[in-house]
Amino acid sequence: MAVQLTLTFIILGITIVLFMTNKLRADLVAMLALLSFVLTGILSPAEALSGFSNSVVIMIAALFIIGAGIFRTGLAQMAGTLLLRYSGDSEKRLFILLLVIVASVGAFMSNTGTVALMLPIVISIAISINSSPTKYLIPLSYMASFSGLLTLIASPPNLIISQQLVDNGFERLSFFQITPIGIIGVIVGIIYLYAVRNTLLPKGKKSSSSSDHQKLSIKQLVSDYQLGDNLFQVKVPVESDLVGKRLAQLKIPATYQLCILKISRKSTEGLNLLPMTYQEMAGPTTVIQAKDLLYIQGSGVNLQRFMDDYELQVEDGESEAGQLVSKQMGIAEVLLTPHSSFINETLRSISFREKYNVNILGINRQGEYVAKDMSKQKLKFGDALLVQGSWDSIEMLAKETRNVVVIGQPKEHASMAAASGKAAIAGIIMLLVVGLMVLEVFPAVISVLIGAALMILTGCVRNMDDAYGQINWESIILIGAMLPMATALENTGGMQLLSEGIIQVLGGVGPLGVLAGIFFLTMLFGQFISNTATAVLFAPIGLSAAISIGVSPYPFLIAVAVGASMAFSTPVASPTNALVMTAGNYQFKDFVKIGVPLQFIMFIVMMIAIPLLFPF
C-alpha cells in the first residue's frame, strides 16, 4: 500500500508538471495519467473507465448540444444584443453586468450548466463588440463557481456536505443557509476580476463574424460578387406559356442569357389545409407550374424580354442574401486547387453543374468579377467560384478536395439557416431545462438530456451529425479521464493520511488552524480533481476533525464546500474551466496567473467570514 501511495503522488505530480508545461494536449495528459494508474495496479480497468459513465460527463456533452441550439437559432445573439443595450457604450458596465447575470443564473442550476448555456451568449457579445472572447470566458467560469455557493442546489458540494450532516445526526442545510457566504464570494470575485481584466487576462485575438480569407458572411459574398442588381424574383401566372414546360425545352440561358437558380412553390398534395412552401434547385428536368416563384440571375434588360414573352410578373422580394439562402438552399465560395483538372477547361466542358448539382453565380479572377458568359470562360488557377445549390450538395462539394476547396464553413451556414426563426423554441427549451433542474423533477443529467433531444427534434440543431459535431470531445475526454483520480487517492489511503496529518499538525493551533488546514487542502486538491469528488473525499475529514476537537461541524463542512468551489488555478480543476479553455484558446499558465492570487484572497476572506457566519 505504501508503494502504491507513493506512486499515486508521483503520477499526480508528473501530471501537474505536464499540464503546466503545455507540451502535450491536456486530454492526452489526462489519458496518460489514467493509463499509469491502471498499469501500476492502483486502479482496475473498470475503475479507470468509470469517469466516462459519470453523469457529469454525459451532462456536459448534452449541454454542448443545447448551447449549439441557443447559438444557431440566434437566441444567443438576441440575448447579447439585449445585454449590450442595457450596458450602453460602457465596456466596464458590460463586464460587471455580465458577471452579475452569470451569478444570478448559476444560483439555481449547476455551474457547468451555467457556463454551457452562457458560453454562446458571451462569444456572441465578443463578436458584436469586436473584442476577444478570452477577456470574458475565464471570468465566466470563475463567476459560475462563485454562484455555486448562493443556494443549496447550485453546486454538488453543497448537497454533499448537507447529506454528510444528516447522515451523522445533524440538521441539514436550508436552501439559503449558505447564501451569505456566496454573496461575499460573488462580490469579492467581481471586484477582483474587474481589477485584473486588462492586466492578467490574456488579450487574445479580436473576434469577427467574418474574415478576409474565409468570408463567412453570406451578405459579404453577395456584395463582393456584385450580385445586387442581377437577382430577381418572378412569379408565373396561371395563363403563362411557361406552365407545364421543362426548363430543357425552353433553353433560357441560350436565348435570354438568364439563369434560373431555384424555384419556390406551395405544395398541392392531400387536403392542403396547411400548404407548405418548399424550394428546389432548378434543373433541366424541372417542370414549371402555375404560381411558381422563380429566382433568376441576369441583367434587367434580358429579364424584361423574358417576362414580355411569357407574361411573367416581378415580385418584390427579400434582400439579395435572403433570395439565395434558405433552410434548403445556400451559397458558398470555392477555389481551384493547384493541381485541379479543371484548369484551362470551361464550366460547360467539365459539366460542373451536372457533376456537383450546383449553379455558378460568378467567377472571381484576381479581384475582377465575371458574371456574363461564364460557361465559355476557361478556368485558371486562383479562380474563385461562387456556387449556389442545396446545402447537401454544397456539403458534398466540400468533400471534393482534389479539384476544388470550399472556403468557409458550409455546414455551419447550413445549420444556421436550418435553425433560423426558432429562437423562441430554443428559449422555451432552455427555460424548461432550467425549470426541471431547479424543481429537481428529474436528476440533472436527465433534464439536460431532455433539452438536448428537444433541440434536435425541433430543428434548433440540424441533425444528429450536427449535434455530435458540436460536442467538444477534448473537454469530454479530459474530464472523464481525470474523475477517477479521486478513486486512486482513496484506494491508496492518501485521503486518510491527509486527515490525520491535518489534526496532528494544526490541532494544537485551535479550531481556526484546523479550519484553515482543511480549507487549504480542499482547495489544493480541488485543482486536480472535480469539486464533487473533492467534497466527497474531504467532507468526512472535516466532520471527523470537528468532532475530534469538540466543536460544531458546520464551519468545517462549509469550508469544504467553499474550498471545493475555489477551483481556479488549473484548467482541469473544474468542468467549467475545461469548457472555456478550448473556446478561449487558453494555456495552463493563464489559469495559474489569474487563479492563484484569487485563491489567496478568498482564503483570507473566508477565514474571516466562515467563523463569523457559522461559529465554532
Image (spheres, rainbow, N blue to C red):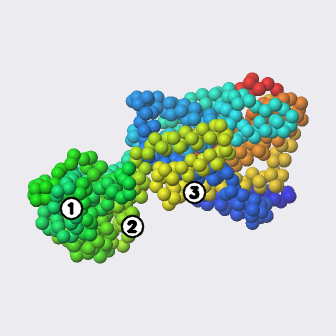
Dot 1 falls on a residue whose secondary structure is loop
Circles 3, 1 touching at the beta carbon (< 8 Å): no
The extreme top residue here reads 612
Dot 3 falls on a residue whose secondary structure is helix
Quadrant of the image occupied by residue 47: bottom right
Residue 433 place in picture, x, y as percent: 58, 42
Is tag 1's residue or tag 2's residue first in the polypeptide sequence? 1
Label 2 belongs to which residue? Answer: 396
Q: Which amino acid does label 1 sit on?
A: Val
Q: Tell which of 385 and 396 is nearer to you.
A: 396
Circles 1, 2 touching at the beta carbon (< 8 Å): no
> From where the camera sits, is residue 94 visible?
yes
CA–CA distance in space, label 3 to label 2: 27 Å
Q: What residue type is labelled 3?
A: Glu
Q: Left or right of 173: which side holds 361?
A: left
At 10% from the left and 59% from the top, the residue drawn is: 309
Residue 544 place in picture, x, y as percent: 86, 38
Q: Which amino acid does label 2 sit on?
A: Met
